[in-house]
Amino acid sequence: MARVNPGEFIRQVRQETSKVTWPSRRDTLISTAMVFVMVILAALFFFTVDQILSFIVRLLLGLGG
């Protein structure tokens, strides 16, 4: 890889960052909300599976009486 002087590097970085399309505030809020919803759904799913498996193990070991 060829060495680039610091001035050229800064110019290239600015050129590349000008190509970036940033999400709008609305897109960011929707994405954030979707992440929270998916985290809550995943937590509920794993909590339910854990409770079912715990019940089965206690039943099999005779500790649920």
Image (cartoon, rainbow, N blue to C red):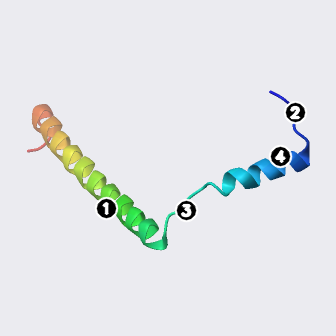
Q: Which residue is mark 2?
A: 3
Identify which amino acid the numbered label 2 is placed on.
Answer: Arg
Q: Which residue is mark 4?
A: 9
Q: Residue 20, image x and y in percent?
A: 60, 56
| Of residues 43 and 11, the one drawn nearer to the viewer in this rendering | 11
| Of residues 24 and 63, the one drawn nearer to the viewer in this rendering | 24
Q: Mark 3 or 1 closer to N-term?
A: 3
- State yes or no: discs 2 and 1 in contact (Cβ < 8 Å): no
- State yes or no: discs 1 and 4 in contact (Cβ < 8 Å): no
Where, by quadrant of the figure, is residue 31 drawn?
bottom left
Q: Mark 3 or 4 closer to N-term?
A: 4
Circle nearer the viewer, 1 or 4: 4
Q: Cα distance, mark 3 to mark 4?
A: 22 Å
Check the image and report above or below for 30 versus 16: below
SS at circle 3: loop
Q: Is residue 53 left or right of residue 59?
A: right
Q: Residue 65, image x and y in percent?
A: 8, 44
Q: Mark 2 or 4 closer to N-term?
A: 2
Q: Which residue is mark 1?
A: 37
Q: Cα distance, mark 2 to mark 4?
A: 9 Å
Identify the residue shown where x is 86% and y is 46%: 8
Q: Residue 62, image x and y in percent?
A: 11, 36
Q: Which residue is mark 3?
A: 22
SS at circle 2: loop
Q: Mark 1 or 4 closer to N-term?
A: 4
| Of residues 39 and 62, the one drawn nearer to the viewer in this rendering | 39
Identify which amino acid the numbered label 3 is placed on.
Answer: Trp
Q: Cα distance, mark 2 to mark 1?
A: 46 Å
Q: Mark 2 or 3 closer to N-term?
A: 2
Check the image and report above or below for 31 versus 55: below
